[in-house]
């Protein structure tokens, strides 16, 4: 058990050093594109910014039908929402997933 614990501790400690973007100097808000594709993905920065909140503001009266993770191997990760707009049209809205526990700064 001791042999397993040492590599596990080393792995956990190294997770905090993996370089993700440092968003600590950026004002909370929404950045990027209009969410219509991976290339135009929205980036939500801040605890109060979320995909559903952005969608509700951009598409009033819409309904989120589905949320999925798109994570092609070796590429960026996205939250993809399937949204039914108030007029009945269905669209996909892309949000870039960045960061995680390794990006938390003390």
Image: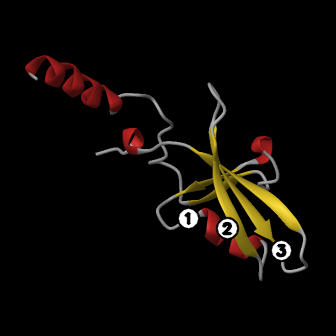
Callout 1: helix, strand or loop? loop
Q: Residues within 10 Å of mark 3 (few under 14, many from 20)?
A: some
Colour pattern of the rendering: secondary structure
Callout 3: helix, strand or loop? loop
Please report contact status of discs 2 and 3: CB closer than 8 Å, yes or no.
no
Lower sequence index among marks 2 and 3: 2
**Which image quarter is the N terminus in?**
top left
The answer to whether 74 appears left or right of 89 in the picture is left
Disc number for residue 49 = 1
Lower sequence index among marks 1 and 3: 1
Q: Kindly indicate the quadrant of the structure image that contains residue 14.
A: top left
The answer to whether 92 appears left or right of 1 in the picture is right
Please report contact status of discs 1 and 2: CB closer than 8 Å, yes or no.
yes
Which residue is nearer to you in this view: 10 or 4?
4
Classify 83 as above or below 93. Answer: below
**Which image quarter is the C terminus in?**
top left
The answer to whether 23 appears left or right of 58 in the picture is left
- Residue 33 in the image: state x and y as whole percent: 77, 51
- Residue 85 in the image: state x and y as whole percent: 83, 74
In the image, what residue occupies the spot 13% across and 16% down? 3
Which residue is nearer to you in this view: 106 or 41?
41
- Residue 28 in the image: state x and y as whole percent: 54, 60
In the image, what residue occupies the spot 44% across and 44% down? 100
Residue under label 3:
85
Lower sequence index among marks 1 and 2: 1
The answer to whether 63 appears left or right of 79 in the picture is right
Callout 2: helix, strand or loop? helix
- Residue 36 in the image: state x and y as whole percent: 82, 53
Disc number for residue 54 = 2
Estimate the spatial distance between the alpha carbons at disc 1 and disc 2, rounded to whole Å. Answer: 7 Å
Q: Residues within 10 Å of mark 1 (few under 14, many from 20)?
A: some
């Amino acid at each position: 058990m001791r042999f397993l614990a040492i590599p596990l501790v080393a792995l956990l400690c190294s997770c905090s050093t993996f370089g993700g973007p440092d968003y600590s100097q950026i004002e909370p808000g929404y950045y990027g594109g209009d969410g219509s594709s991976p290339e135009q993905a929205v980036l939500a920065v801040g605890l109060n910014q979320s995909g559903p909140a952005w969608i509700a503001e951009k598409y009033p009266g819409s309904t989120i039908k589905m949320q999925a993770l798109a994570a092609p191997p070796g590429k960026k990760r996205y939250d993809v929402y399937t949204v039914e707009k108030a007029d009945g049209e269905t669209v996909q809205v892309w949000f870039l997933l960045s960061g995680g526990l390794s990006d938390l700064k003390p």
